[in-house]
Amino acid sequence: MAKDGEKSEWKEFLWNPRTREFLGRTASSWGLIILFYIVFYLFLGGLFALTMYIMLQTLDDHKPTWQDRLSTPGLVIRPRQDEAFEIVYTIQNTESWDMYAQALDKFLSPYNDSIQAQKNHECTADQYFLQEDSGDVKNNPKRSCQFNRTILEACSGLHDRYYGYQEGKPCIIIKLNRVIGLMPGKDGQAPSVTCGAKRDDSDKIGEMIYFPSNGTFDLMYYPYYGKKAQVNYSQPLVAVKFLNITVNQDINIECKIHANNIPTGSERDKFAGRVSFKLRINSQN
């Protein structure tokens, strides 16, 4: 009998024909609750949409309002296979170094003089290329300066399609990471790159030559205004050619940026403003 009573109570809770209640509430009660939640969630959605709209009005399509970055940009080398910062090959084994030559070809193809002449402008060297906005009038899209592949001379791949790898005199390309608004250098002094072997390998690295001369990043490529504002921006490059490096040995090399307003290394990132990699050239002779 107790079980029959419990079933009756459950049936009455689900639907009470006397009071016409469903789950303990009348139709008007359910209607008011549903109406309340509809209004409540519409209000929350509207409040969220209004907040997003107001926030978006403060943003610039071409320049981030806030930049969470290190004060010193990093350096990157090419060629580079995957995430490994090492270049290892055998002079007599074409397959071991051909991938590096192909990677450099692909990387440098946008720097062909013909492409640069179509996309970018000839700028005045040794001075910043400033393109400021006029109040609320945005000066967009902004122009970019030409960086022609021929500047890299012996490391351009135009005269030596193998970039010296086939004779044990490889070229390494170095670029400075983009930072919006960065104006490296000061008082007309352009930033430059130097490379050298780490302490234990200092007698193995041999002679190096830089392109452009002195390994400089010309001031005319700065400041950088952002990917949307400068759609055709070409990062300046520095090439390093190793002329008589010791073969059959690992050589740890570090390249640094030098500018009187860019510190190298910091407590936050000891690799800021520098890049390290391993170079090993094997020879069967």
Image (cartoon, helix red, strand yellow):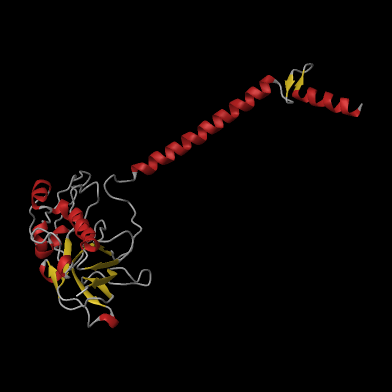
Q: Position of residue 179 (x, y in %)?
A: 26, 58
Look at the image and tell me whether residue 150 can be seen: yes
* Quadrant that contains the C terminus: bottom left
Q: Is residue 76 left or right of residue 2?
A: left
Q: Nearer the viewer, residue 15 or 176?
A: 176
Question: At 37% across and 72% down in the image, what residue appears?
Answer: 267
Which quadrant of the figure has residue 93? bottom left
Question: At 44% across and 36% down in the image, what residue appears?
Answer: 49
Which quadrant of the figure has residue 209? bottom left
* Quadrant that contains the N terminus: top right
Q: Position of residue 5 (x, y in %)?
A: 87, 26
Look at the image and tell me whether residue 216 can be seen: no
Q: Nearer the viewer, residue 53 or 146?
A: 146
Q: Is residue 34 left or right of residue 242?
A: right
Residue furthest to the right in view is 1
Q: Position of residue 81 (x, y in %)?
A: 29, 60
Question: At 26% across and 80% down in the image, what residue appears?
Answer: 201
